[in-house]
Image (cartoon, rainbow, N blue to C red):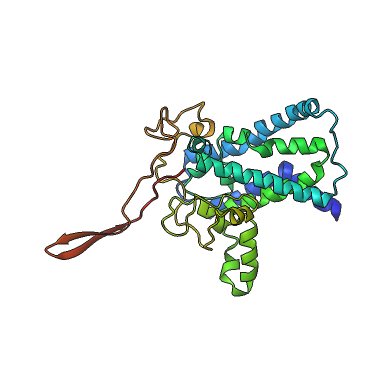
Amino acid sequence: MIQFIEAIFTNLNTWGLAVLTLIIGVFEFSFGLYGKEWNRNEKLLDLACYALPRLVTRPLVAYFGLKFVPFILPHSKDAFEWVPFFWGFIIICIYDDLTQYWYHRLHHEIPWLWRFHRTHHSASYMGMAMASRQNIIYTIFFSQTYLTVILVYLGLGYPALFAKGIKSLITKMAHSSIKWDKPFYEKKWLHPIAWILERTISTPATHHAHHADTINDGVGHYKGNFGNMFFLWDIIFGTALITRQYPKSYGISHYEGDEWYAQLLWPIFKSKVAGSELAANGPMVREDIVKQEGPVIHKQENKEIILETKAITPGLTG
């Protein structure tokens, strides 16, 4: 039984997760869950963001890392091999996800960092592909990219294998357009489980809120809900919003379809979209397109005539 479970997580970190992503991705696409917004430019970007780290970045980091680390820590090989699996697993999960929480949060709160993370928020849809939709430089400086290499060298490769596999599943399912958490909110007898679940790990409801294109509807919360595997960090650091609802729209209000290569490789390649945050001499954080909310009222001979109703988008995305 133990060997079977180990084989599952071993495969999750090689070809298994890719196959799982493909299966669920096909399901999402077949049922139109990406919507009409998933055009050629967006497909190329999602595919490149998914493939490049797995085929180039991570293999190179692993190869050169395992050759470089012995020079930095020459007497530390398998130094932590004595740590029990359970504690190794817990320590890795906490360290890995807590550092990612702050890495993620800082890219929203520090203006000059925003453009490196902007790619992850530009899509007007949610799906499994969104989990890996990142600027390549954001990915390269990801602490998790190097953590696994160091842990393997220190003798904690086995618990790291499980931690990485579980985290990958949770983050992908939190980005998925399949609202698997919805039954927990709809069925009253599942509410106690929902209360614990939504405060422990990222779910579609809490993480979709982070990808909303507005914060004015009481559901969107892109200035919070930063957790990746654990939503617990948002609870602890006061950045959580739990509504058990899903945003009606996603993305960035001023997004005008920057070229996929600019989103993948900015600032090496710049966007040709005038005024874009990724364009040459573009702003660090562009103001969102603001629309009026609620009824637009025109007065005529002391009478109020309601002409139309529009939505409003927030002031700043970063």
Residue 82 lies, with reference to residue 297, above or below; the image says: above
Residue 182 lies, with reference to residue 171, above or below; the image says: below
How many numbered discs, if any?
0
Residue 127 is left or right of residue 66, and the answer is: left
Which quadrant of the figure contains the N terminus? bottom right
Regarding residue 166, the answer to whether it shows in the image is yes
Residue 238 is left or right of residue 216, and the answer is: right
Between residue 285 and residue 169, name the one nearer to us.
285
The residue most toward the left is: 301
Between residue 19 and residue 6, name the one nearer to us.
6
The residue most toward the right is: 82
Percent position (x, y) of residue 225?
55, 52
Q: Quadrant of residue 248?
A: bottom left
Residue 65 is left or right of residue 312, and the answer is: right
Between residue 226 and residue 39, name the one nearer to us.
226
Percent position (x, y) of residue 186?
56, 70
Name which residue lies at 53% across and 54% down: 208
Percent position (x, y) of residue 9?
76, 48
The residue most toward the front is: 237
Percent position (x, y) of residue 40?
48, 39
Name which residue lies at 55% across and 50% down: 127
Residue 141 lies, with reference to residue 88, above or below; the image says: above
Name which residue lies at 65% across and 51% down: 229
Regarding residue 52, the answer to whether it shows in the image is no
Name which residue lies at 41% across and 28% down: 281
Q: Quadrant of residue 193?
A: bottom right
